[in-house]
Image: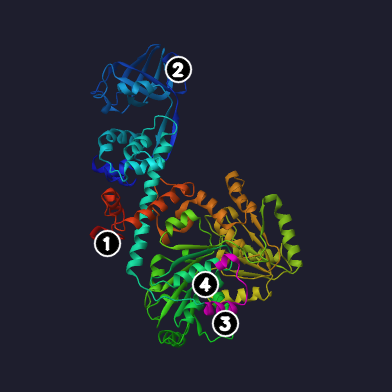
Amino acid sequence: MGPLRAEQLAGLGIRTVRDLIQHYPFRYGAQEAARPIADLVEGHNVTVVGTLADVRYLPHRRRAPIRALVEDETGECEILWFQSAYLADKLNLGDRLRLHGKARLGGDMFQLVNPQTEWLREQDEKSSTEERLEPVYPASMEITSRQLKRWIRAILPGVLGELPELHAPLFLRERRLPTISTAVQRIHVPRRNGDAQIARRRLAYDELLLMQLAIALKREQRRRAARATPIEVSPEIDRRIRRRLRFTFTGAQDRVVAEIAADLARPYPMNRLLQGDVGAGKTAVALYAALAAVARRMQTAIMAPTEVLARQHFANVERYLADSRVRRVLLVGGLPIRERRRICGAIADGQIDLVVGTHALLERGVTFASLGVVVIDEQHKFGVRQRSTLRHKGLEAHLLTMSATPIPRSLAMTAFGELDISVIDELPPGRMPVATRLVRRHQVAEAWAFVRRQLRAGRQVFVVYPLVEESDTLPLRAAAREADLLAQDQLRGHAVGLLHGQMKPADKHAVMERFRARKLQVLVATTVIEVGLDVPNATVMVIHHAERYGLSQLHQLRGRIGRGGYEGHCLLMTDVDSLSSRRRLEVLVRSSDGFEVAEEDLRHRGPGELLGVQQHGDIGLRVARLPDDFDLLELAAGDARQIVAADPQLRRSDRAACRAELIRLHRHSLAWLDSG
């Protein structure tokens, strides 16, 4: 390859022979079985197997094609290759060729122009006429899939024997997996249906196993290296906390509390992700962990991504701890300098037990006397570095992260694999599922009539738009303009407010307080209401341009309603008639299970978009597909745990190739493995 080709290949992420071999097809086209030359049909894509009977090429004539005759027992056809001078030295009379292209009549003879060409060896003859799967590669404007196929097939024979095999033969037989050389050969050159699937399964397994091994090794290293102060939750402390919270936990909450208590009692830091649908009771469980630390004279920090959510958490804390001796404080941005200094000084001196705050907790001036537990809400809104910064303020603190955005288990095991996972999969008594309906153009008037009936019954309504202001490039309605139009038209006579992320925190807080106090009946908003707004009297959510949102985000939005014992109604308004968009939105109509919705979202959008690449980056899967390969992921995760338990540094000779590959892929995070 010359410098220009090398640059073009680099654009596809291909810089080495290994990269080229690992540039796998993303789909396969069917190449029909060979037919006799006498049976060719003009204008059809056909496959011909025959012998090269004649070759003519005039190299001194610019742009002259290579002309050849190929014959079989029924006749002959002409082959023309344009701009393919490199073939001239490869074509020899008597060569057996398999050719695939569009047949056309040239005079009294059929022609194939620039067909896909394969030289057949003696051992290929038996299968040469069969139907084939034709690999299609991720390509670019400069480099086509056919070029990639040609280059890959040219180098495959020389590199298959050099590929490192990660597993012993017995290991592969037990898992019914082919060898690495067979898998790579079959994924690039499948001979029959099923070859590519078998090959992809082996390659996907290796990808998932290496990821799970890296996760297991990091967890093992962290547990050996990090130390935390054990926080024992005695029966008396458990009783006092439950009495303070003043309600009975669900069975799921009890199970999760037991998992957290077991973590806190250990001498290494808890690192747990708490998942649960909107309204499942995660905040109460988090407060249990916080009060367990306070009971042992240690401090707790609860961090939320927005001031709105931080203030709501603090209001809940105040409600539960109204007459207690727990010293608590709210720390958010924008506080007067003197007030901020006073709060920071009290935290540093150990005069505060529980701090609720936003990113302000991460600033240098905030230090703790004895930070025991860190709770981070809506953890996906924070980067890994931000979570680590708060956790390391003082000694290594126990970490509990929470997410109301359901994360599919397959994604949690990969993107958040270093965390232990608890799931609250049971809603408290009295929570009713939200009835969700798709509203098309011809149903809009009927939908607004329903909204007005709910308002007359004393209920409150959210109306959500994707934009704050109208855009010149996007044909979408915007919250600021629509709030005025609704107040004058469809919702005339009802108090309508506006809330969006560009407002000052004090203004946002004032609008939300008016809505909570029922001084506003309708709140027109952007997705700023996605988390943190708890208004039990709100029963209707109208979402405009619903096709513009991810399914998980829509599920999160509808979780804002139906929280007060009244039935909730979510109206998904869309002007798009696309069948695929309609089918996607109908997932929400038929299911109120956040985890089922998240699985579908993962299928449609992929992990990068679902998680946000800025926070998590690419999870590095090139072959494995989530959630479809969940069975493989579970197998790989179980194998990884067993391998690391038996050989924590992969020193055994039968794991040398795995160790080398892990060091190559994770040199920075597993540097100790290289030197240890």
Residue matched to label 1: 672
Is 468 in the magenta?
Answer: no
Q: Chief secondary structure of the magenta span? A: helix
Q: Image quadrant for the N terminus?
A: top left
Which numbered disc covers residue 321? 3
Count of numbered marks: 4
Which numbered disc covers residue 617? none
Q: Give the range drawn in magenta.
A: 235-254
Residue 352 spot, x, y in % from top left: 47, 85
Q: Which colour scheme is used?
A: rainbow
Give the spatial CA distance, label 3 vs label 2.
Answer: 84 Å
Give the spatial CA distance, label 4 vs label 1.
Answer: 34 Å
Residue matched to label 2: 40
* Residue 559 in view here: yes
Residue 178 spot, x, y in % from top left: 36, 38
Above or below residue 185? Residue 354 is below
